[in-house]
Image (cartoon, rainbow, N blue to C red):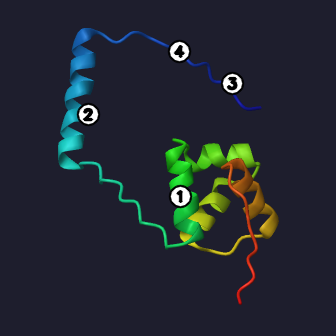
Amino acid sequence: MAKELKHVNRSLTDEQRQQAGAIRDGAQQDFPPKPVQQKTPPPGIPSQSFAAREQRGMTRYELGKIANVPSTVVRAIEQGDGVPLSRFHAVVTSLGLVIELVEHS
């Protein structure tokens, strides 16, 4: 039978807090975080959907929750990858946009 472990919280002393802070600062100096670089989306639908999402101050995750699709679908649209039309429609509608078919002459 497995033993049940009990989590114990204990307060750190000021000295332990300072020591932990010094270790954290040293680690950040030795291994600085990499800056996040977002690719610019391809022109057309990907850039329009990206701009609409950014204008509304939404993350991909938030938009996915509202559209009831995974955030990977939102990313795929913004990268110009193919997605099912039903999911594309859900994302576009959640952004307040419409899909319009136009006949070329």
Front-most of 7 and 49? Answer: 49
Q: Amino acid at mark 2?
A: Arg
Instruction: Name the residue tied to disc 4.
Output: 8
Q: Amino acid at mark 4?
A: Val
**Number of the front mark, 2 or 4:** 2
Q: Residues within 10 Å of mark 1 (few under 14, many from 20)?
A: many
SS for callout 1: helix
Residue 4, disc: 3
Q: CA distance from mark 2 to mark 1?
A: 36 Å
**Number of the front mark, 4 or 3:** 4
Instruction: Name the residue tied to disc 2.
Output: 24
Q: Among all residues in the image, which is located at the extreme right?
A: 86
Q: Are marks 4 and 3 in contact (CB under 8 Å)?
A: no
Would you say 14 lies left or right of 97 here?
Answer: left
Would you say 85 lies left or right of 63 here?
Answer: right
Q: Amino acid at mark 1?
A: Phe
Question: From what the image shows, is residue 74 above or below residue 63?
Answer: below
